[in-house]
Amino acid sequence: MLACELRLHGVRVVVLERLTEPTTQSRGRGLHVRSVEIMDQRGLLDRFQAVGERFQVGGPFAGLSAPWPAGLDTAHPYGLAMPQPVTERVLTERAVELGAELRRGCPLVGLDQDEHGVRVELADGTRLRSRYLVGCDGGRSTVRRLIGVGFPGEPATSETLLGDMAVTADPATVAAVTAEVRKRHVRFGTVAEGDGTYRIIVPAAVSPAAAGSAAAGSDERSDAPGFEEFKQRLREVAGTDFGAHSPRWLSRFGNATRQAERYRVGRVLLAGDAAHIHPPAGGQGLNLGVQDAFNLGWKLAAEVAGWAPATLLDSYHAERHPVGARVVANTRAQTALMGTDAGAKALQELFAELVEFEVVNRHLTEMITAVGVRYDFGAGPDASGLIGRRMRDVPLRRGRLYELLHGGRGLLLDRTGRLSVTGWADRVDHVVDTVDAAGAAGAAMGGAAEAGSAVDACGAGFAGGSAELGAPAVLLRPDGHVAWVGDDQRELLPHLARWFGVATG
C-alpha cells in the first residue's frame, strides 16, 4: 500500500520482501469500512469487489451479537471479506503497475543513517542507499530493533490456535456445534471458506512452557501447532474434531499488546505491525497497517519532492500513534470480555445489554471499522464538526467525491466559485461543483446505502448521519481528511501552507 501511494507521486520505490514467494497463510480476512473507502479513493475498489465478498457483521466488538447499525457515517456500509494473500496480490499488482520494484528473498540485516539518507545491508551482502526507509516488517521488526525503538506493552498470557483445513462433518453440524461452544468460549469460531474447507479458531491449552515464555516477555511462540495437537484441542473444547483432515496451514498467536514508542527516528519510519501488535479481536490488524500507509505515503512523497512543510512528516507519528494506542486498548478490552471466568461472563452479559442501544452499537462499530477516526489538527472550535475527519463519499454534479481523489492530490471542493489555489495548483486540485439534486433528494429520503446520507455540496451527515452539516467549501488532504472548512480566501491560505507548503509562482 505504501509503495502504491509513493509511486502515485513519482517517488522511486524498492520493496525488500523477506519471503521468496507470496505467503499462502491468511491471517487477515479482509477490509473494514475505512479500508474499503481508501481503496475507492485510489480507484482500486472495483478490483477488490471482484475478489471479495461483502459483509455486514453486527457486533464486531468481542463477538457480541448485534445488528449492523443504521446510519453509519459512510457511503460504503460494508466490509469486503477475502483471504490475505488475495489482498496482497491486488496491492502488489497495483504497485508494480505504478512502477514499484519488488525484490523477493531479500531480508534486511543491517542499517545506518545520516542526515542525507539511509544505507541498508541485505543478508546476501548487498548494500543499498535511499533517502528514507520504512519498516513494514512485522511484529518482530528488524528495522525497529536496529533503530533502537522501544516496544513496551503487555506480553502474551494466552494462545489461540488457527488453521485452514477440510472437515468431514456436514455444515449443519459444524454450525450447531460452533453456536453451542461459543456460549462458553467466545474465542472459538469456524468460518466456511466456500471450497469445502473451514477456518477454525480454538483456544490453546495453557502449558507451563507457554506461561513461562509469557512471563519472560516473549509475545508469541514461533512454532506452529502440530495437526494432532490441533485436533486434540478441538476435541477438548468442542467435543469433536469435525473429522478434520488435509490442513492447508496451521498457526498460533498470543494476546500480546505492544506499541512502538516512536514511529520515526530520523529518516527511518515504522508502519503496520512493526509499530503495533495486538490480538486479532475485531479484525483490525491488517486494516490498521493499510491505514498507516495511507497516512504516511503522501507526506513522505512531499518530503522527497521538497515541498513538505517542516512539521508534515512528524505529523505521521502525531496522528497515527494515538490511533494505534486506541486499537491496542480496545483489543485489550475485547480480550477481557472474551474470557471464560465469572468476571468475564458478567461483563459479556452487561455489554450484551449495552449494544442493544443504537448509539453504543454505532460507536463500537465505528471504532472497529475506523470510521470514527478523527485527527487532532489543533484548530480549536469547529462548528462544522468536519475538521480532522475523513470526508465520506458524496455525489457531485459530475461524478462523486472519491473519484476526484484517485491521483492522491489535495482537493479544494468549492461551491462558492470565489476561492483559489493559485500557488498550490501543482499539489492541490480545485473543483467548483454542487451536489446532484436527485442524489441529495434520495439521500434525504433515507435511501442511501450506496449514495450516502443527506448531503449538500461539500458536507455530509456526520455523527452517524444524524445531522446534515453543510459547508461552502472544504480543503481535503490527499488522504481525504478535512483540513479546512469555510468561504474566505484569506482564511484558506494558511491552511494551504500548513499542509501543502510554500506557494510557488
Image (cartoon, rainbow, N blue to C red):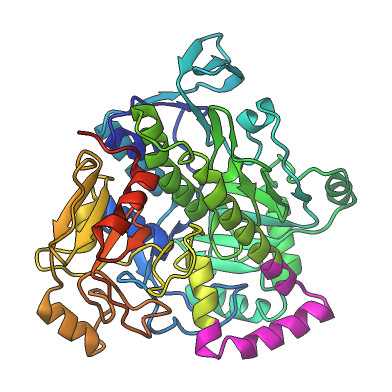
Residue in front for this viewpoint, 398 or 459: 459
Image quadrant containing the N terminus: top left
* Residue 454 image-quadrant placement: bottom left
Residue 334 part of the magenta segment: yes
Of all residues, the one furthest to the front in this rendering is 490
Image quadrant containing the C terminus: top left
The answer, for residue 27, to whether it is visible in the render is: no
Q: Is residue 363 above or below residue 212?
A: below
Residue in front for this viewpoint, 300 or 124: 300
Residue at 21%, 60% (x, y): give it.
413
Span highlighted in magenta in the image: 333-360
Residue 156 part of the magenta segment: no
Residue in front for this viewpoint, 412 or 455: 412
Q: Is residue 439 above or below residue 19?
A: below
Residue at 74%, 82% (x, y): give it.
347
Predominant SS of the magenta segment: helix
Please indicate whether residue 160 sits to the left or right of residue 6 in the image: right
Q: Is residue 344 above or below residue 202?
A: below
Residue at 68%, 51% (x, y): give it.
253
Residue in front for this viewpoint, 127 or 52: 127
Q: Position of residue 308 (x, y in %)?
A: 39, 36
